[in-house]
């Protein structure tokens, strides 16, 4: 399918100094009235008027290529007409249902059934954020195993509510709020660019996975038998990290051996983002429980869910509840979003466009002294900046300068990674090859500009 007509034709086009005068008014209003924890407009100083496909117009009429996609929400494109029509139709009927059945909810479950692996027979909707799906997954694991500890991974991001935050590895997020949930432990992720075991991916024995096995096997590891491990099959906020291809299969094997539930968090990597419907499909494994949110709601209608194996459906009514566990507009829009993903072969388009974009970004590994690694899968891409390629000393200031230089050129990106030194690309998946190449070209210009200023 040609997605060209879904986006603004002229993007990128910047006609005012940035932020433009009208954006500035909105930003001032926001900083005078909203709380200081507001964060995205600090790196992306603008006010949004409209979104279309993979492009955004700000309130001053400037057009941008959106390589951030609402943090991985807008997979089917801003204002996707099929999603909007389905949601609009539902608006006239009714908008809130708790968990009482209704036609859009049924359609959503039917559509999820089409894309979920057959092993995950049960679907459960909780509150409308990804964090709640994580809470829910952990509760289900504890309920079934009657065990308490959970093992997460270095570089992980799972959300902001108490359990979800406990499972995040980043000190920035947690340090002011300790203590959080007890008995959460962290194991190394397969982050080959910065392997904690100093191994080379070509000839390692996936030592990071073996280390997890050691934790589970050794009664003196300090970790009592966990209920579950929770992992992103491709890490998002941690810096778009694609693990060694043997890592996730090895973890699955270890979980089976030690009778630990295997939870995969697909909140960011799910729904075609990595070139498959779900990122675990690259690994030949199926989790016991998976989490979903973000793109599940079509174009940002809030919704979250878990899917899990039949044998785990032991909990009793009311064990996980919430007022907003049934956003009917999100069901209608989200179900139409899944229809769109399937009818437009969005996963295939993503895989193809992602290869082109990554190819262009990879060129920078040769061309720039500050690009340590360009990596990713599908359209979940990252470029890690370092001060020195030999020592790999992280270059977070460089990364944030590149983000600003991209913004000026009409390309929206975000920063993540262990050291906030990774430029992250999560464009709407309907981005055309032309716009993807253009964004990569402007990103390369931005890197050169920042390099020259040093
Ligand atoms: C992998 C992952 N899990 C969980 C979450 C939390 O989702 P939410 O922000 O909707 O609570 C995020 C958000 O970025 C995420 O990337």
Image: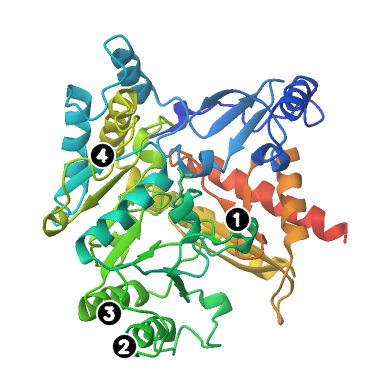
Badge 2: residue crowd in 10 Å (few <14, some 14–19, many ≥20): some
Mark closer to the chain start, 2 or 1: 1
Quadrant of the rendering where the C terminus is positioned: bottom right
Q: Mark 3 points at which residue?
A: 254
Q: Is mark 1 within 8 Å of ligand 1?
A: no
Callout 4 secondary element: helix
Q: Name the residue under label 4.
A: 342
Q: Nearer the viewer, residue 23 or 276?
A: 23
> Can the viewer see residue 320 in this picture?
yes
* Disc 2 + disc 3, Cβ < 8 Å: no
Callout in the foreground (2, 1): 1
Mark closer to the chain start, 2 or 3: 2
Q: Residue 251: image x %, image y %? A: 32, 75
Q: Which of 389 and 103 is in front in this view?
A: 103
Q: How far apart are marks 2 and 4 (CA)?
A: 43 Å
Residue plotted at (14% across, 50% down) = 121
Mark closer to the chain start, 3 or 4: 3
Q: How far apart are marks 3 and 1 (CA)?
A: 32 Å
Callout 1 secondary element: helix
Q: Name the residue under label 2.
A: 217
Callout in the foreground (2, 3): 2
Q: Residue 178: image x %, image y %? A: 58, 60
Q: In this view, does 188 lie above or below 266?
A: below
Callout in the foreground (4, 1): 1
């Amino acid at each position: 399918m040609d997605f060209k007509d879904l986006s603004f034709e002229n993007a990128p086009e910047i006609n005012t100094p940035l932020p433009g005068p009208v954006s500035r008014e909105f930003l001032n209003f926001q900083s005078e009235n909203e709380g200081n924890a507001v964060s995205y407009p600090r790196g992306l100083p603008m006010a949004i008027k409209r979104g279309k496909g993979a492009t955004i117009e700000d309130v001053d009429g400037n057009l941008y290529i959106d390589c951030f996609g609402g943090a991985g929400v807008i997979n089917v494109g801003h204002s996707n007409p099929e999603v909007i029509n389905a949601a609009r139709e539902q608006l006239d009927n009714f908008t809130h249902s708790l968990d009482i059945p209704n036609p859009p909810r049924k359609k959503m479950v039917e559509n999820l059934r089409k894309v979920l692996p057959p092993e995950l027979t049960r679907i459960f909707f909780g509150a409308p954020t990804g964090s709640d799906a994580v809470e829910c997954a952990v509760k289900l694991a504890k309920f079934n195993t009657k065990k308490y500890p959970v093992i997460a991974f270095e570089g992980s991001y799972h959300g902001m509510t108490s359990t979800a935050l406990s499972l995040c590895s980043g000190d920035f997020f947690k340090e002011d709020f300790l203590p959080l949930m007890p008995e959460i432990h962290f194991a190394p992720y397969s982050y080959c660019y910065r392997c904690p075991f100093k191994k080379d991916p070509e000839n390692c024995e996936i030592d990071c996975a073996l280390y997890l096995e050691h934790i589970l096997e050794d009664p003196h590891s300090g970790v009592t038998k966990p209920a579950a491990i929770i992992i992103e099959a491709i890490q998002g906020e941690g810096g778009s990290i694609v693990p060694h291809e043997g890592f996730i299969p090895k973890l699955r094997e270890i979980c089976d051996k030690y009778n630990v539930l295997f939870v995969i968090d697909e909140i960011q990597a799910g729904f075609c983002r990595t070139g498959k419907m779900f990122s675990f499909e690259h690994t030949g494994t199926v989790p016991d429980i998976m989490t979903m949110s973000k793109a599940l709601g079509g174009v940002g209608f809030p919704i979250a869910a878990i899917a899990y194996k039949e044998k785990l459906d032991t909990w009793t009514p009311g064990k996980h509840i919430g007022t907003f566990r049934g956003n009917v507009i999100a069901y209608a829009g989200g179900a139409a979003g899944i229809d769109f993903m399937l009818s437009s072969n969005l996963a295939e388009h993503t895989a193809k466009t992602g290869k082109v974009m990554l190819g262009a970004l990879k060129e920078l590994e040769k061309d720039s002294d500050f690009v340590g690694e360009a990596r990713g899968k599908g359209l979940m891409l990252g470029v890690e900046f370092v001060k020195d390629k030999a020592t790999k000393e992280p270059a977070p200031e460089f990364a944030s300068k590149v983000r600003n230089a991209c913004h000026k050129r009409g390309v929206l990106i975000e920063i993540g990674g262990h050291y906030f030194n990774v430029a992250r690309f999560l464009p709407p998946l309907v981005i055309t090859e032309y716009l993807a190449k253009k964004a990569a070209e402007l990103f390369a210009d931005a890197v050169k500009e920042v390099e020259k200023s040093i």
